[in-house]
Image: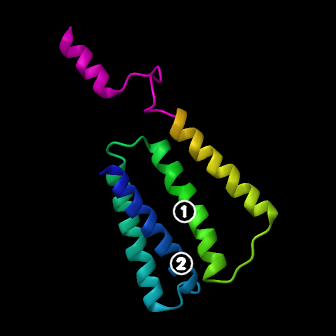
């Protein structure tokens, strides 16, 4: 369920970012209201996903997918241009997201005790 919440957070961020462009510096009322609603929903669902997904992993996925999808939206909808440096940067971000998901916390022992581990260890003593 946490990854569904994360997907909803990403969708909210994409809608909010697109409406941010449409708001023209918060000078248009309805896109501005849409920005606020979208980002409130985005952070609400992101916070729900953080109940079980580690912060660094969730944030890497959220920002990585958000950057790629926002770039695609900016090219397709807003007719913006990107260059080779932009594409290279996005690829490097995606590589970082993959590395975090494969080897980051939550994928084996990190060597650090969590508060839950400490509580369990205290009860066993």
Q: Single out the residue that lies furthest toward the left.
A: 123
Total numbered circles: 2
Query: Which numbered disc covers residue 66?
Result: 1
Crowd band around label 2 with a 10 angstrom C-alpha radius: few (<14), some (14–19), many (20+): some
Q: Is residue 108 above or below residue 94?
A: above
Using the image, determine if residue 68 lies above or below residue 103. below
Disc with the residue nearer the chain's start (2 vs 1): 2
- Whether 33 is among the magenta residues is no
Q: Looking at the picture, how far across and down is residue 57, in whole percent?
A: 48, 43
User: Which residue range is magenta in the image?
Assistant: 104-125
Label disc, if present, on residue 18 of the rendered structure: 2
The local crowd at label 1, few if under 14, some if 14 to 19, many if 20 or more residues have their Cα within 10 Å, is some
Residue 20 is left or right of residue 125, and the answer is: right
Q: Image quarter for residue 76?
A: bottom right
As drawn, the residue found furthest toward the right would be 84
Is 74 left or right of 107, judged from the image as shown? right
In this view, the residue in front, 17 or 93, is: 93
The mark found on residue 28 in the picture is none
Residue drawn at (42%, 69%), measured in percent from left and top? 12
Q: Nearer the viewer, residue 94 or 41?
A: 94
Residue at image position (49%, 56%) is: 62
């Amino acid at each position: 369920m946490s990854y569904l919440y994360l997907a909803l957070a990403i969708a909210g961020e994409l809608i909010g970012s697109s409406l941010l462009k449409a708001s023209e510096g918060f000078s248009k009322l309805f896109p501005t209201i849409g920005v606020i609603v979208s980002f409130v929903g985005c952070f609400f669902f992101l916070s729900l996903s953080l109940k079980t997904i580690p912060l660094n992993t969730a944030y890497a996925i959220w920002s990585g997918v958000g950057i790629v999808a926002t770039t695609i939206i900016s090219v397709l909808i807003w007719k913006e241009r990107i260059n080779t440096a932009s594409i290279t940067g996005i690829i490097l971000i995606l590589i970082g997201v993959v590395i975090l998901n494969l080897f980051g916390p939550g994928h084996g022992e990190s060597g650090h005790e969590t508060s839950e581990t400490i509580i369990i260890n205290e009860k066993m003593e």
